[in-house]
Each structure stands twice: as C-alpha cells, then as structure tokens.
Amino acid sequence: MRIALFGATGPTGRHLTAQALAAGHEVVAVTRRPGSPPARPGLRLAVADATDQAAVDAAVEGTDAVLSALGARFSKDSVSLYSASATAITDAMVRHGVKRLLAVSSSIADPGWRPTGAHFFNHVLDPLVNRRLGRTLHEDMRRMEDVIRATGLDWTLVRPSGLFEHPVVTDYRTAPVSADGVFTARTDLAASMLRELEERRYVRTAMGVITTEVKPNIARLIWNEGVKKK
C-alpha cells in the first residue's frame, strides 16, 4: 500500500515510517524540513506545509491511504494546525479519490473519558495539564475531528492517552471511542494505526489506544510532551 504520512518526522511519525516500511508499505513522508528523513527503500520525501493546499494535493495524489500524525505544543494562543491541516488533507483526498484516513487525536477529545482508578490523574493532572495548559491545543483537535467527521471518507480518529517513548511494541489495547487507560507508547500507537489500516475495525468512528505493560515517569512525560515538545 502507498501511504501519505503527514508529520513523518515527528515523534509518532518516525515510528510510523519505520513500521510501515518494515511491513512492506511504500511511504510518502510529508515534512516541512528538506533533507529528512534520510533516503530508504520504499520511502519518498514530500516537502510540504500540511496547511498548504497545493502542496498537500501533490503529496496525496497517487496514494492509497493517508495517515496524519501531526502534533503541536501547548500554547496560550489559539492553535489551528490540526483543523487547518485536516481541511487541506480531506479536500485533497476527495479530489484525488483517496478514501482511507487515520488521524491522531487524543482521548481528551472524548468528554466522558476518565481512566478507572486514576484518581491523581483525573483530579489533579488532567484538569491542570490537559484542560488548562493544553486547552487551546485540544480545542483544535476537536475542531479537526469535526472536519473529518463531516466528510464521506473512510476515516478513523485515533485517540491515544498520554504519549511516551518506548523502544518496542507491547501488547497494547484498543477500544471504541476511547480506551480505559492513562498512557500510550508511541510504538503502540503506530502499530495500532497500521493494524487498523489493514483490519478496518474502526471505520468512521474513533479508536482508543492504550499501553498497559509499561508506564512512563509522569513528571518527565509532562515536560517532554507539554513543555519541551517541538
């Protein structure tokens, strides 16, 4: 399968690229930075801003599916990357007859998401980090979801919980709408997206993804994902 991957050089996109190539897919890696990622068999680089309609059109043309792993930092200012890129990507997919789309969102987009037994997270970290520091970012994720839902595409909204780095894929879990857990390894997020691309269990709905075998350091996670993230 030929996949257009937006956010290919980001933290999740790098795992998606490696896993997709290992599975035998061709990847059109869409990035704003020329010269990265390095050339590999099956990989083609497309330099494009994900909100530039003409550039997005060129990246999507001739592909079989689109994966979006775009991400932004927490900001007090309004965030528009998610919704603006979703508009450009879905418009390009319609024009070129590409039906399958998987886009990374967040468990926070589910208003009823409250992980079982996670008292400190639910009552301290979530209100402070996600609902306050990440408010503008998550508002735009919800706008992105609305844009995608309004299309006639075969879409899946992929909702991980708190993202962290882990070197290997674990025995992750998926669930409709959102999953009952606090953390998601990026390796597991990538693996779940590629599996869903083949199995199509969550077409035109949301898919929650969680990691249960390992847990990150919470303080380091907040720093890396909410403060240091580029």
Image: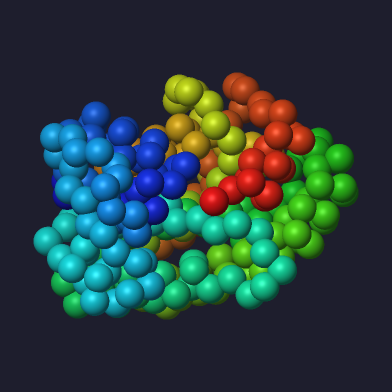
Q: Is residue 126 above or below residue 48?
A: above
State the image quarter where residue 163 is shown. top right
Q: Position of residue 96 (x, y in %)?
A: 16, 72
Residue 158 in view, yes or no: yes
**Closest to the observer, 33 or 50:** 33
Q: Position of residue 142 (x, y in %)?
A: 58, 69
Q: Residue visible at 76% across and 39% down?
A: 116
State the image quarter where residue 224 is shown. top right
Residue 94 in view, yes or no: no
Q: Is residue 98 above or below residue 179?
A: below
Q: Residue visible at 19% across and 77% down?
A: 95
**Closest to the observer, 102 or 74:** 74
Q: Position of residue 211 (x, y in %)?
A: 58, 31
Q: Residue visible at 13% across and 35% down?
A: 41
- Answer left or right for 195 relative to 182: left
- Answer left or right for 114 relative to 156: right
Q: Residue visible at 55% across and 58% down?
A: 72
- The colouring scheme, among rainbow, by chain, secondary structure or one colour, is rainbow
